Image: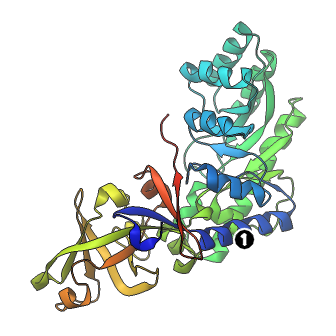
Amino acid sequence: MNLKSLSTPAALIDVARMTHNIERMQHRMNALGVRFRPHVKTTKCAQIVDAQIAAGAQGITVSTLKEAEQFFASGIRDIVYAVGMAPGKLGQALALRRQGCDLKIVADSVACAEAIGAFGREHDEAFEVWIEIDVDGHRSGIAPEDDRLIAVGNALARSGMRVGGVMAHAGSSYDYDTHDALVRIAEQERAGCVRAAQRLRAAGVSCDVVSIGSTPTALAATHLDGVTEVRAGVYVMFDLVMHNVGVNDTAEIALSVLTTVIGHQEEKGWAIVDAGWMAMSRDRGTQRQKRDFGYGLVCTENGDVLGDYLMSGANQEHGVISRTSEADLDIARRFPIGTRLRILPNHACATGAQHPVYQALAEDGSVDAWPRFYGW
Protein backbone atom coordinates (compact mmCIF):
# COMPACT_ATOMS: atom_id res chain seq x y z
CA MET A 1 0.00 0.00 0.00
CA ASN A 2 0.95 3.64 -0.46
CA LEU A 3 -0.59 7.01 0.33
CA LYS A 4 -2.48 7.22 -2.97
CA SER A 5 -4.10 3.83 -2.41
CA LEU A 6 -5.69 4.72 0.94
CA SER A 7 -9.41 5.24 1.20
CA THR A 8 -10.52 8.31 3.16
CA PRO A 9 -10.99 9.28 5.88
CA ALA A 10 -7.97 7.53 7.39
CA ALA A 11 -5.86 8.06 10.50
CA LEU A 12 -2.36 8.60 9.16
CA ILE A 13 0.86 8.32 11.18
CA ASP A 14 4.03 9.90 9.82
CA VAL A 15 6.52 7.32 11.10
CA ALA A 16 9.54 9.61 10.73
CA ARG A 17 7.88 12.29 12.87
CA MET A 18 6.77 9.71 15.42
CA THR A 19 10.30 8.30 15.67
CA HIS A 20 11.72 11.80 16.14
CA ASN A 21 9.24 12.47 18.96
CA ILE A 22 10.05 9.17 20.70
CA GLU A 23 13.78 9.82 20.53
CA ARG A 24 13.39 13.42 21.71
CA MET A 25 11.55 12.41 24.88
CA GLN A 26 13.72 9.40 25.64
CA HIS A 27 16.94 11.39 25.25
CA ARG A 28 15.57 14.02 27.63
CA MET A 29 14.62 11.46 30.27
CA ASN A 30 18.02 9.82 29.95
CA ALA A 31 19.70 13.19 30.47
CA LEU A 32 17.59 13.84 33.57
CA GLY A 33 18.50 10.43 34.97
CA VAL A 34 15.03 8.90 35.35
CA ARG A 35 13.14 5.91 34.01
CA PHE A 36 10.55 6.68 31.39
CA ARG A 37 7.19 4.91 31.45
CA PRO A 38 5.07 6.09 28.48
CA HIS A 39 1.33 6.47 28.84
CA VAL A 40 -0.03 4.38 25.99
CA LYS A 41 -3.62 5.67 26.06
CA THR A 42 -2.72 8.13 23.29
CA THR A 43 -2.11 5.45 20.68
CA LYS A 44 -3.21 2.07 22.16
CA CYS A 45 -1.09 0.48 19.44
CA ALA A 46 1.39 -2.37 19.90
CA GLN A 47 3.69 -1.30 17.06
CA ILE A 48 4.07 2.19 18.51
CA VAL A 49 4.63 0.95 22.05
CA ASP A 50 7.22 -1.50 20.77
CA ALA A 51 9.07 1.46 19.24
CA GLN A 52 8.92 3.34 22.56
CA ILE A 53 10.34 0.37 24.46
CA ALA A 54 13.03 -0.19 21.83
CA ALA A 55 14.09 3.43 22.37
CA GLY A 56 14.54 2.82 26.11
CA ALA A 57 11.15 3.08 27.81
CA GLN A 58 10.66 0.79 30.82
CA GLY A 59 7.12 -0.41 31.40
CA ILE A 60 3.93 1.34 30.36
CA THR A 61 1.05 3.30 31.84
CA VAL A 62 -2.52 2.48 30.85
CA SER A 63 -5.88 4.16 31.38
CA THR A 64 -8.09 1.06 31.21
CA LEU A 65 -7.75 -2.52 32.39
CA LYS A 66 -8.63 -3.62 28.87
CA GLU A 67 -5.47 -1.87 27.69
CA ALA A 68 -3.54 -3.70 30.40
CA GLU A 69 -4.94 -7.04 29.21
CA GLN A 70 -4.17 -6.32 25.58
CA PHE A 71 -0.64 -5.09 26.14
CA PHE A 72 0.12 -7.91 28.58
CA ALA A 73 -1.05 -10.36 25.91
CA SER A 74 1.35 -8.66 23.49
CA GLY A 75 4.27 -9.31 25.85
CA ILE A 76 4.51 -6.32 28.20
CA ARG A 77 4.51 -7.24 31.89
CA ASP A 78 5.34 -4.02 33.81
CA ILE A 79 2.09 -2.00 33.76
CA VAL A 80 0.61 0.80 35.87
CA TYR A 81 -3.17 1.24 35.73
CA ALA A 82 -3.16 4.96 36.45
CA VAL A 83 -6.84 5.45 37.26
CA GLY A 84 -8.38 5.28 40.72
CA MET A 85 -9.36 1.67 41.41
CA ALA A 86 -13.07 0.94 41.32
CA PRO A 87 -13.79 -1.97 43.71
CA GLY A 88 -15.83 -3.75 41.05
CA LYS A 89 -12.75 -4.00 38.82
CA LEU A 90 -10.52 -5.68 41.38
CA GLY A 91 -11.37 -9.12 40.03
CA GLN A 92 -10.14 -8.06 36.60
CA ALA A 93 -6.94 -6.72 38.15
CA LEU A 94 -6.47 -9.91 40.17
CA ALA A 95 -6.83 -12.07 37.06
CA LEU A 96 -4.06 -10.11 35.36
CA ARG A 97 -1.73 -10.49 38.34
CA ARG A 98 -2.45 -14.22 38.62
CA GLN A 99 -1.46 -14.59 34.96
CA GLY A 100 1.94 -13.02 35.74
CA CYS A 101 1.31 -9.37 34.93
CA ASP A 102 3.22 -7.00 37.22
CA LEU A 103 0.18 -4.74 37.49
CA LYS A 104 0.21 -1.72 39.80
CA ILE A 105 -3.08 -0.11 40.80
CA VAL A 106 -3.92 3.30 42.27
CA ALA A 107 -5.79 4.65 45.31
CA ASP A 108 -6.40 8.19 46.53
CA SER A 109 -8.83 7.68 49.43
CA VAL A 110 -9.13 5.63 52.59
CA ALA A 111 -12.32 4.04 51.27
CA CYS A 112 -10.55 2.88 48.13
CA ALA A 113 -7.55 1.63 50.12
CA GLU A 114 -9.81 -0.33 52.47
CA ALA A 115 -11.71 -1.90 49.57
CA ILE A 116 -8.45 -2.99 47.94
CA GLY A 117 -7.20 -4.34 51.26
CA ALA A 118 -10.38 -6.30 51.99
CA PHE A 119 -10.43 -7.82 48.49
CA GLY A 120 -6.73 -8.63 48.68
CA ARG A 121 -7.05 -10.41 52.03
CA GLU A 122 -10.09 -12.35 50.81
CA HIS A 123 -8.17 -13.60 47.77
CA ASP A 124 -4.74 -13.89 49.40
CA GLU A 125 -3.27 -11.25 47.08
CA ALA A 126 -0.88 -8.47 48.11
CA PHE A 127 -1.66 -5.84 45.48
CA GLU A 128 0.99 -3.24 44.73
CA VAL A 129 -0.76 0.10 45.17
CA TRP A 130 0.47 3.57 44.25
CA ILE A 131 -1.08 6.58 45.98
CA GLU A 132 -2.13 9.39 43.67
CA ILE A 133 -0.96 12.87 44.67
CA ASP A 134 -2.76 16.09 43.73
CA VAL A 135 -0.04 18.62 42.90
CA ASP A 136 -2.17 21.27 41.19
CA GLY A 137 -5.89 20.86 41.98
CA HIS A 138 -6.48 19.65 38.46
CA ARG A 139 -8.23 16.34 38.99
CA SER A 140 -7.67 13.42 41.36
CA GLY A 141 -5.33 12.71 44.23
CA ILE A 142 -4.38 13.74 47.76
CA ALA A 143 -2.50 16.97 48.46
CA PRO A 144 1.07 16.32 49.65
CA GLU A 145 0.45 17.78 53.13
CA ASP A 146 -3.02 16.28 53.63
CA ASP A 147 -3.37 13.96 56.65
CA ARG A 148 -5.33 11.54 54.45
CA LEU A 149 -2.08 10.64 52.70
CA ILE A 150 -0.73 8.89 55.78
CA ALA A 151 -4.14 7.38 56.53
CA VAL A 152 -4.27 5.80 53.07
CA GLY A 153 -0.73 4.51 53.40
CA ASN A 154 -1.46 3.00 56.81
CA ALA A 155 -4.74 1.43 55.63
CA LEU A 156 -2.93 -0.31 52.79
CA ALA A 157 -0.03 -1.45 54.97
CA ARG A 158 -2.33 -2.78 57.72
CA SER A 159 -4.19 -4.95 55.24
CA GLY A 160 -1.01 -6.46 53.85
CA MET A 161 -0.97 -4.52 50.59
CA ARG A 162 2.31 -3.11 49.30
CA VAL A 163 2.58 0.67 48.92
CA GLY A 164 4.76 0.77 45.84
CA GLY A 165 5.04 4.52 45.55
CA VAL A 166 3.33 7.80 44.74
CA MET A 167 2.29 9.23 41.41
CA ALA A 168 1.17 12.64 40.15
CA HIS A 169 -0.01 14.20 36.90
CA ALA A 170 0.21 17.97 36.50
CA GLY A 171 -2.72 18.23 34.11
CA SER A 172 -2.95 21.97 34.68
CA SER A 173 0.23 22.31 32.62
CA TYR A 174 -2.05 22.25 29.57
CA ASP A 175 -3.36 25.65 30.68
CA TYR A 176 -0.01 27.42 30.20
CA ASP A 177 1.81 28.60 27.10
CA THR A 178 5.16 30.03 28.18
CA HIS A 179 8.38 28.23 28.99
CA ASP A 180 8.75 29.95 32.37
CA ALA A 181 5.25 28.91 33.42
CA LEU A 182 5.88 25.31 32.35
CA VAL A 183 9.16 25.22 34.27
CA ARG A 184 7.31 26.47 37.35
CA ILE A 185 4.50 23.90 37.15
CA ALA A 186 7.04 21.14 36.44
CA GLU A 187 8.89 22.02 39.63
CA GLN A 188 5.61 22.20 41.54
CA GLU A 189 4.75 18.71 40.29
CA ARG A 190 8.19 17.34 41.21
CA ALA A 191 8.37 18.97 44.62
CA GLY A 192 4.83 17.99 45.62
CA CYS A 193 5.22 14.34 44.71
CA VAL A 194 8.66 14.09 46.36
CA ARG A 195 7.27 15.71 49.50
CA ALA A 196 4.43 13.17 49.64
CA ALA A 197 6.95 10.33 49.39
CA GLN A 198 9.04 11.85 52.18
CA ARG A 199 6.01 12.08 54.47
CA LEU A 200 5.05 8.46 53.84
CA ARG A 201 8.56 7.24 54.54
CA ALA A 202 8.75 9.31 57.73
CA ALA A 203 5.52 7.63 58.86
CA GLY A 204 7.04 4.20 58.30
CA VAL A 205 5.23 3.46 55.03
CA SER A 206 7.33 2.10 52.17
CA CYS A 207 7.50 4.30 49.09
CA ASP A 208 10.06 3.27 46.51
CA VAL A 209 8.62 4.90 43.40
CA VAL A 210 8.08 8.62 42.82
CA SER A 211 6.32 8.87 39.46
CA ILE A 212 5.31 12.15 37.82
CA GLY A 213 4.48 13.27 34.37
CA SER A 214 2.72 15.12 31.63
CA THR A 215 4.11 15.95 28.22
CA PRO A 216 4.59 19.68 28.96
CA THR A 217 6.24 19.18 32.36
CA ALA A 218 8.44 16.33 31.12
CA LEU A 219 9.80 18.59 28.40
CA ALA A 220 10.16 21.65 30.66
CA ALA A 221 11.61 20.23 33.91
CA THR A 222 15.09 21.52 34.72
CA HIS A 223 15.86 18.75 37.22
CA LEU A 224 14.06 15.76 38.70
CA ASP A 225 15.75 15.30 42.07
CA GLY A 226 13.90 12.69 44.13
CA VAL A 227 11.88 11.43 41.14
CA THR A 228 12.36 7.85 39.97
CA GLU A 229 10.26 7.83 36.80
CA VAL A 230 8.29 10.03 34.41
CA ARG A 231 5.09 9.25 32.53
CA ALA A 232 3.90 11.08 29.42
CA GLY A 233 1.73 10.08 26.49
CA VAL A 234 0.70 12.60 23.86
CA TYR A 235 4.33 13.49 23.06
CA VAL A 236 4.55 10.47 20.74
CA MET A 237 2.08 12.08 18.31
CA PHE A 238 1.83 15.66 19.60
CA ASP A 239 -1.16 17.77 18.51
CA LEU A 240 -2.46 21.32 18.19
CA VAL A 241 -3.24 21.68 21.91
CA MET A 242 0.39 20.86 22.69
CA HIS A 243 1.48 23.22 19.90
CA ASN A 244 -0.46 26.03 21.60
CA VAL A 245 1.11 25.09 24.94
CA GLY A 246 4.45 25.63 23.21
CA VAL A 247 6.10 22.21 23.33
CA ASN A 248 6.01 21.23 19.65
CA ASP A 249 5.99 22.64 16.15
CA THR A 250 3.23 21.70 13.72
CA ALA A 251 5.95 19.87 11.73
CA GLU A 252 6.33 17.47 14.70
CA ILE A 253 2.66 16.41 14.78
CA ALA A 254 2.79 12.80 13.64
CA LEU A 255 -0.95 12.04 13.51
CA SER A 256 -3.29 13.45 10.90
CA VAL A 257 -6.52 12.48 9.19
CA LEU A 258 -6.35 11.97 5.46
CA THR A 259 -9.51 13.28 3.75
CA THR A 260 -10.92 14.05 0.30
CA VAL A 261 -12.71 17.14 -1.02
CA ILE A 262 -16.23 16.08 -2.03
CA GLY A 263 -17.99 19.41 -2.61
CA HIS A 264 -18.05 23.20 -2.28
CA GLN A 265 -20.12 26.12 -1.07
CA GLU A 266 -18.30 28.67 -3.20
CA GLU A 267 -20.21 31.75 -2.06
CA LYS A 268 -19.21 30.94 1.54
CA GLY A 269 -15.61 30.05 0.71
CA TRP A 270 -16.10 26.46 1.85
CA ALA A 271 -14.72 23.17 0.64
CA ILE A 272 -16.55 20.09 1.94
CA VAL A 273 -14.52 16.99 2.85
CA ASP A 274 -15.42 13.42 3.80
CA ALA A 275 -13.97 13.67 7.32
CA GLY A 276 -16.38 15.04 9.92
CA TRP A 277 -16.34 14.84 13.68
CA MET A 278 -16.62 11.04 13.48
CA ALA A 279 -13.11 11.10 11.98
CA MET A 280 -11.65 14.08 13.89
CA SER A 281 -13.61 13.75 17.19
CA ARG A 282 -15.59 16.56 18.76
CA ASP A 283 -12.59 17.68 20.82
CA ARG A 284 -12.26 21.46 20.55
CA GLY A 285 -9.40 21.74 23.02
CA THR A 286 -7.82 24.70 21.22
CA GLN A 287 -11.01 26.75 21.55
CA ARG A 288 -9.93 28.22 24.90
CA GLN A 289 -6.26 28.61 23.95
CA LYS A 290 -4.38 31.46 22.30
CA ARG A 291 -5.27 30.15 18.83
CA ASP A 292 -8.45 28.28 17.97
CA PHE A 293 -7.79 25.70 15.25
CA GLY A 294 -11.44 24.75 14.83
CA TYR A 295 -11.54 20.98 14.26
CA GLY A 296 -8.00 20.90 12.87
CA LEU A 297 -5.31 22.53 10.76
CA VAL A 298 -5.31 21.81 7.02
CA CYS A 299 -2.25 20.43 5.22
CA THR A 300 -1.53 19.17 1.74
CA GLU A 301 -1.67 15.44 1.11
CA ASN A 302 2.11 15.46 1.65
CA GLY A 303 1.78 17.08 5.06
CA ASP A 304 2.70 20.73 4.40
CA VAL A 305 0.60 23.25 6.35
CA LEU A 306 -1.65 25.33 4.07
CA GLY A 307 -1.46 28.76 5.69
CA ASP A 308 -4.58 29.64 7.68
CA TYR A 309 -6.97 27.03 6.30
CA LEU A 310 -8.81 25.15 9.05
CA MET A 311 -11.54 22.58 9.40
CA SER A 312 -13.86 25.27 10.67
CA GLY A 313 -16.97 23.14 11.00
CA ALA A 314 -17.93 19.50 11.21
CA ASN A 315 -21.00 17.31 10.96
CA GLN A 316 -20.93 13.58 11.51
CA GLU A 317 -19.36 12.66 8.16
CA HIS A 318 -18.78 16.09 6.59
CA GLY A 319 -16.08 18.61 7.36
CA VAL A 320 -15.95 22.26 6.31
CA ILE A 321 -12.62 23.67 5.15
CA SER A 322 -12.30 27.45 5.09
CA ARG A 323 -9.76 30.22 5.46
CA THR A 324 -9.68 32.17 8.73
CA SER A 325 -8.44 35.52 7.38
CA GLU A 326 -11.18 36.03 4.79
CA ALA A 327 -13.47 33.87 2.71
CA ASP A 328 -11.66 32.21 -0.18
CA LEU A 329 -14.13 32.69 -3.02
CA ASP A 330 -11.76 30.84 -5.32
CA ILE A 331 -11.78 27.74 -3.13
CA ALA A 332 -13.28 25.42 -5.75
CA ARG A 333 -10.32 26.10 -8.05
CA ARG A 334 -7.83 25.88 -5.20
CA PHE A 335 -9.23 22.58 -3.88
CA PRO A 336 -11.01 20.79 -6.76
CA ILE A 337 -13.25 17.78 -6.17
CA GLY A 338 -11.01 14.82 -5.36
CA THR A 339 -8.24 16.86 -3.75
CA ARG A 340 -6.76 14.96 -0.81
CA LEU A 341 -5.73 16.83 2.32
CA ARG A 342 -4.42 16.03 5.79
CA ILE A 343 -5.98 17.53 8.92
CA LEU A 344 -3.81 17.91 12.03
CA PRO A 345 -5.90 17.20 15.17
CA ASN A 346 -6.59 19.25 18.28
CA HIS A 347 -6.16 16.22 20.54
CA ALA A 348 -4.29 13.17 19.27
CA CYS A 349 -5.83 10.86 21.89
CA ALA A 350 -9.38 11.75 20.90
CA THR A 351 -8.79 11.64 17.15
CA GLY A 352 -6.96 8.33 17.37
CA ALA A 353 -9.88 6.88 19.31
CA GLN A 354 -12.15 7.43 16.31
CA HIS A 355 -10.26 4.91 14.17
CA PRO A 356 -9.80 1.12 14.46
CA VAL A 357 -6.48 1.19 12.62
CA TYR A 358 -3.66 3.62 11.89
CA GLN A 359 -2.09 3.87 8.45
CA ALA A 360 1.63 4.13 9.15
CA LEU A 361 3.41 6.09 6.42
CA ALA A 362 7.13 5.28 6.12
CA GLU A 363 9.76 7.57 4.62
CA ASP A 364 9.88 5.43 1.47
CA GLY A 365 6.18 6.12 0.88
CA SER A 366 4.93 2.68 1.84
CA VAL A 367 1.97 2.33 4.20
CA ASP A 368 1.41 -0.36 6.80
CA ALA A 369 -1.79 -0.96 8.79
CA TRP A 370 -1.29 -0.79 12.58
CA PRO A 371 -4.37 -1.93 14.56
CA ARG A 372 -5.52 0.03 17.57
CA PHE A 373 -6.82 -1.47 20.84
CA TYR A 374 -10.32 -0.67 22.03
CA GLY A 375 -12.53 -1.20 25.05
CA TRP A 376 -12.64 -1.01 28.83
Indicate the position of residue 221 as horizontal and vertical percent values: 75, 67
178 w.r.t. 34: above or below: below
In the image, residue 54 lies at what x, y percent?
77, 57
- Residue 98 falls left or right of residue 206: left
Q: Callout 1: helix, strand or loop?
A: helix
Q: Nearer the viewer, residue 119 or 360?
A: 360
Toward the left, the furthest residue is 267
285 or 375: nearer the viewer: 375
The answer to whether residue 340 shows anywhere in this view is: yes
Image: 284 above or below 336? above
Q: Residue at x 85, y 68 (%)?
A: 31
Neighbour class for label 1 at 10 Å: few (<14), some, many (≥20)? some
- Name the residue rendered at 69%, 31% in the picture: 148
- Residue 58: x and y in percent read 79, 49
**Relative to 179, 100 lies left or right:** right
262 sits to left or right of 185: left
- Can residue 144 be seen by looking at this rendering? no
The amino acid type found where label 1 is placed reads Arg
Where residue 15 sits, quadrant-wise, is bottom right
Q: Quadrant of residue 166?
A: top right
Q: What residue is pinned by disc 1?
A: 24
Residue at 73% x, 68% y: name it: 23
